[in-house]
Amino acid sequence: MQTVLIDTDVAIDYLRGEEYARDFLPRLWETNRAYLSVLTIYELYSGMKEKEREPTEDFISACLIEPISQEIAVHGGEWRARYRQKGLSLTAVDCLIASTAILQGHKIATRNIRHYPEKNLLLSLPQS
C-alpha cells in the first residue's frame, strides 16, 4: 500500500474541518500510511494559535514522523539546484519534503502542486 507524506496545506485543511481532508486522512491513519515531515511540524507550529495547540498535537500524534537525514538534505540541495538551473525557484522546505518522499517511497498529499515540479510524486487532491 502506498504511503503518503502529508503536506502542510492538507494538514491545515484537516484541522480547519475541510471535508475532503476529514474523509481522506483517517483512512491513512487506519492503515499506518500517514507520514509527516518534521518540516511540516515546524510549519504547523509557526502559524498555530494557542487554541489550536491540542488539536494540532493530536493530528501530529496520529502520523508517523519522517526526520531529515543527511541523505535527504544532500538530495534536497541537489534537487533545488537542478530546478534553479531550469528557472524554477523552490523553497528549501518543499525541496526537503520532496526529497523525503522520493527517498522514502511516499507520495505527497498536497494541493500546492506548483511547489513540486515532479508531478509523479503527487496524489490527486482538490485544488485550492
Image (cartoon, helix red, strand yellow):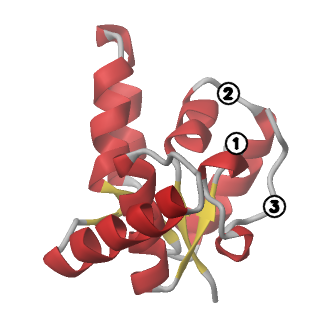
Query: Eyeballing the image, is 31 above or below 95?
Result: below
- Badge 3 marks a residue whose secondary structure is loop
**Is any part of residue 27 visible from this angle?**
yes
Q: Amino acid at mark 2?
A: Gly
> What is the CA distance from the residue labelled 1 to the residue labelled 2?
6 Å
Quadrant hosting residue 107 = bottom right
* Disc 2 element: loop
Q: Residues within 10 Å of mark 2 (few under 14, many from 20)?
A: few
- Return the x and y of residue 48 as percentages of the image width and height: 36, 18
The first of marks 2 and 3 along the sequence is 2
Amino acid marked by disc 1: Arg
Q: Which mark is residue 17?
A: 2
Question: Is 108 situated left or right of 92 in this image?
Answer: right
Label number found at residue 76? none
* 76 w.r.t. 90: above or below: below
The residue at 34%/67% (across/down) is 76
Label 1: how many Cα within 10 Å (few below 14, some 14–19, many 20+): some
* Circles 2 and 3 in contact, beta carbons < 8 Å: no
Marks 1 and 3, the one that precedes in the sequence: 1
In the rendered structure, the answer to whether residue 56 lies left or right of residue 3 reads left
Of the 4 image quadrants, the one containing the N terminus is bottom right
Quadrant of image for the C terminus = top right
Q: Residue at x 48, y 65 (%)?
A: 98
State the residue at coordinates (66%, 62%). Answer: 117
Q: Return the residue at label 1.
A: 22
> Which residue in the protein does label 3 denote?
124
